[in-house]
Image (tube, rainbow, N blue to C red):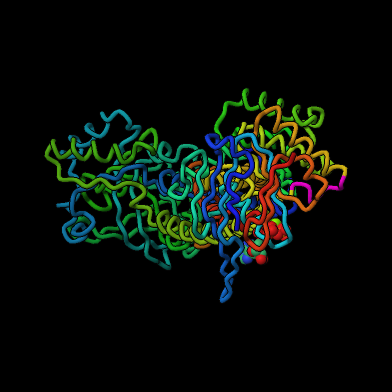
Amino acid sequence: MANLEGTAASTANEDVLLSLNDIRRDYVLGETRVEALKGVSLRIHRGEFVAIWGPSGSGKSSLMNILGLVDAPTSGEVSLEGTPIAQLTDNALSDLRSRKVGFVFQSFNLIPVLSALENVMVPLQIQGVGTAEVRERASQALKDVGLENQASARPDKMSGGQRQRVAIARALVTSPSIVVADEPTANLDSENSYMVVKLMRELNRSKRVTFIFTTHDPRLMDLVDRKLLLKDGLLQADEAVR
Amino acid sequence: MNYFSIGFRNILKNHRRSLVTLLSVGFGFASISLFAGYIKYVYSGLAKQAIHGELLGHLTVMKQGLRTEGRLHPAQYMFSKEELDRVMPILRQYPHTRLVTPRMSLSGMVSNGTASTVFVGEGMVPEDVKKLQGDFQRKLSGDLKADNPIGVATAEDLGRILNLKPGDSAALLVSTVTGQANALDVDIVDDFNTGNVGTNDKFLYMPFDLAKSLYDFDGAERLIVLLDDKAFTEQARTELTAQLKQAGFDVELKTWLELSSFYSQVKRLFDMIFAFIFSNVFIVVVMSIVNSMSMTVVERTREIGTLRSMGLRRSGILRLFTTEAFMLVVLGCAGGLLFTLLVRLAVNSAGITYTPPNSSNVVSLMVDLDVPRMARTFVMLSLLGIAAAFFPARTAARKCITDSLGHV
Ligand SMILES: Nc1ncnc2c1ncn2[C@@H]1O[C@H](COP(=O)(O)OP(=O)(O)OP(=O)(O)O)[C@@H](O)[C@H]1O
Ligand SMILES: [Mg+2]
């Protein structure tokens, strides 16, 4: 197999945000062992807008969980901004996620009892930021996704597209280094899907936030810097777009 | 994190389930509070009955050994007149003393002229009896007449046995301090009800001077001390014992609590019933919180995964759910408190009366507020409620995040 590492953005080697080295992830279910990732090495650079695509069961979600620091590989090394994360305690890892990682989920995962604004406030409250600042920054984040007039709406009163935009605001409110989004458009119609990814792209440009998302939708690939093709637990292609 | 607001809104969101839990916490708290309040009222009634009804006062002063050897060598264990003249001033000078009064007990036979039966008599100073009774029901201890030196009061059942009513005459036969037989004619001037079937057919109260002459002894067997508040009882006992020891008297001071066996029996019984009710209610309440909280935790598994991915520590998840459980307890107890106050108001203004077992008096059913017990109940419910949320939340917080996120 060709050396895929660094084929895209090889000029920005000094600005590596996340690096994965020979990542394997096995799931053990009783007697059977599923090898979801079979040795993935990958570098994500600051400011990139990356899509991971591939057939169902190819290991995209497994890889995203490891990139988002919510799952540990069976073997291999993950470093965020040069720091290996394997040794971290659960609390240290939680704090690291809180500061560095934002999440956008397939099914939005907003807290149903909280309003849009309150949902966006949660990550800052987890960080222990003061109330006034939390409110101000959350309002700004909500404005950035164009939902300032929905601030007091509860998630169940909003459309899927709106909910996902609240989720994007929530992921960005802490100014994370990276936003990880596993199939953020799977529950949206094509129009909303395009809008959501376009919004992420705009925020990626304006705020210099790194985005990685997975998708099945080829149309969305036009918007990205870099496409990673995952097949059968291995990276098959890593191509820069344009 | 705004744990309180998330907790409160989830309580509202699951209003049906929350209502069931709140009702069980509320009724549990109310039933414990009401029962505690009821027995507190009973205790304070029994205390009054012992002090002012059974005329025990707060303290009884007697010579060391009276209760064990007193019957064998009576004169040795009683206060002589000279001793009384020295002991009583010491008791009277004590700042909380309201009254010091001598007593003499003696038993013998009472006869209506044709039939006779046993009586247990008590000689006491008629004016002091009134002071001891205070505003407590006169019916419990009768009314001796200061102007009739041979006027006695009989317990109702004793009077009934011999068909003696106020206005009749009777004869008392006793043995004197030296063992001689001695008899005197007396007038029945009043009757009373001791409130206890065991004593209501035996007790007979007589003027102190009459008891002295029947017993042929110039002195007193015991001294009764009435204080200005029963809260000072123990303190007064300690201080007076020391003062009397210093003055050279080998005496024993008993409190009304020690002498009223009825009070301690009832208290023991009620405390046992209380413990039983308390533990039953507790189990029901705790199970309902456990049930409600473990359902909540399971339903919110994905929310837990989401919060954990956003960097909330495990301890934050624990706080989230224990806060919610604590709020359930607080809200439930607040409702329970309100209910307690309403029921208390209703019961106390309804004027319900009943006859307790082993009693010959009708007493009213009232409910007090036992605030310390209610506070303890609240604290225990809170702790157990928090524990009820803690364990399922800990299990959920320990689950790996991807599993929680994948939970549907
Ligand atoms: N928790 C798990 N336990 C056992 N096997 C798992 C688990 N998660 C994923 N797998 C298996 O690992 C392989 C990769 O799964 P993964 O979810 O990463 O694929 P995917 O590319 O995200 O698929 P999809 O496009 O359907 O979301 C699959 O064979 C899947 O069945
Ligand atoms: Mg997937």
Which residue lies at the image location 37% right of the left edge and 64% below the top edge? B118
Magenta span of residues: A184-190
Residue nearer the viewer, B366 or A163 = A163
Asked whether residue B386 is drawn in magenta, I would say no
Query: Which residue is at a point 24% across and 48% down the rendered structure image?
Result: B221
State left or right for residue B106 relative to residue A173. left
Identity of the residue furthest to the bottom in this view = A31
A179 over B122 or under it: above or below: above
Q: Is residue B405 above or below residue B114?
A: above
Residue B111 visible to an observer of this rendering: yes
Question: Image point 80% across, 50% down: which residue?
Answer: A217
Please tell me whether residue B120 is drawn above or below residue B62 in the rendered image.
Answer: below
Q: Which quadrant of the figure shows ligand 1? A: bottom right
Quadrant location of the C terminus of chain A? top right
Q: Is residue A241 left or right of residue B290?
A: right
Q: Residue furthest front?
A: A2
Residue B10 appearing in the image:
no
Compared across the picture, whether B378 is left or right of A183 comes to: left
Residue B280 placement (x, y as % from top left):
55, 61
Classified by dominant secondary structure, the portion drawn in magenta counts as loop
In the rendered image, the residue lying farthest to the left is: B248
Q: Is residue A186 magenta?
A: yes
- The answer to which of B41 and B301 lies nearer the viewer is B301
The quarter of the image holding the N terminus of chain A is: bottom right
Point out residue B388 in the picture as x, y percentages from the top left corner. Answer: 55, 55
Which quadrant would residue B297 be assigned to in this image? bottom right
| Residue in the foreground of this view, choosing between B65 and A163 | A163
Q: Position of residue B213 (x, y in %)?
A: 26, 49
Q: How many marks?
A: 0
Residue B133 lies, in percent from the top left, at 44, 40
Of B155 and B282, the residue lying toward us: B282
